[in-house]
Image (cartoon, rainbow, N blue to C red):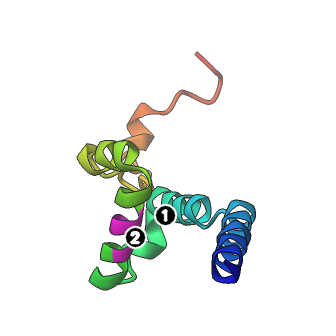
Amino acid sequence: MVGVVVTAAAALAAGYLLGRLRPWQRLSDWAADQVRFTGTWVRGGAGRQAVVALAHAVTAPRTSWHILRAPGTDTTVPVPVRDPNWVANRSPKGGT
């Protein structure tokens, strides 16, 4: 009888702690942040990518499926191109 009470109290305490700490939600938030800001985790190597993708797929399967099917975004900044004929295209000094 004492063993049942101790087991029930331990299960109740574990459930309370898991409810307070919310490890599933924290893992989901971490994985979503890592996937959203792809700069660092892409450079982290194949192992890090696998861990992040697995954590995100387990915690948010519908969202991860949409993210995996979406094309990657281009993060390069466009470089301004100089017009080689700028002298010929400029307006006269006096206006029009």
Q: Secondary structure at mark 2?
A: helix
Residue 65 appears left or right of 10: left
- Please name the residue that numbered disc 1 is placed on: 31
Of labels 1 and 2, earlier in sequence is 1
Relative to the observer, which residue lies in front, 39 or 26? 26
* Image quarter hosting the N terminus: bottom right
Residue 2 appears left or right of 28: right
Relative to the observer, which residue lies in front, 24 or 87? 24
| Marks 1/2: CA–CA distance | 6 Å
- Please name the residue that numbered disc 2 is placed on: 52
Q: Residue at x 64, y 75 (%)?
A: 4
Residue 9: name its quadrant. Answer: bottom right
Residue 23: name its quadrant. Answer: bottom right
**Span shown in magenta:** 51-55
Label 1 Cα crowd, 10 Å radius (few <14 / some 14-19 / many 20+): many
Q: Residue 81, how many percent across, how many down?
A: 39, 50
- Which SS does the magenta portion mostly show? helix
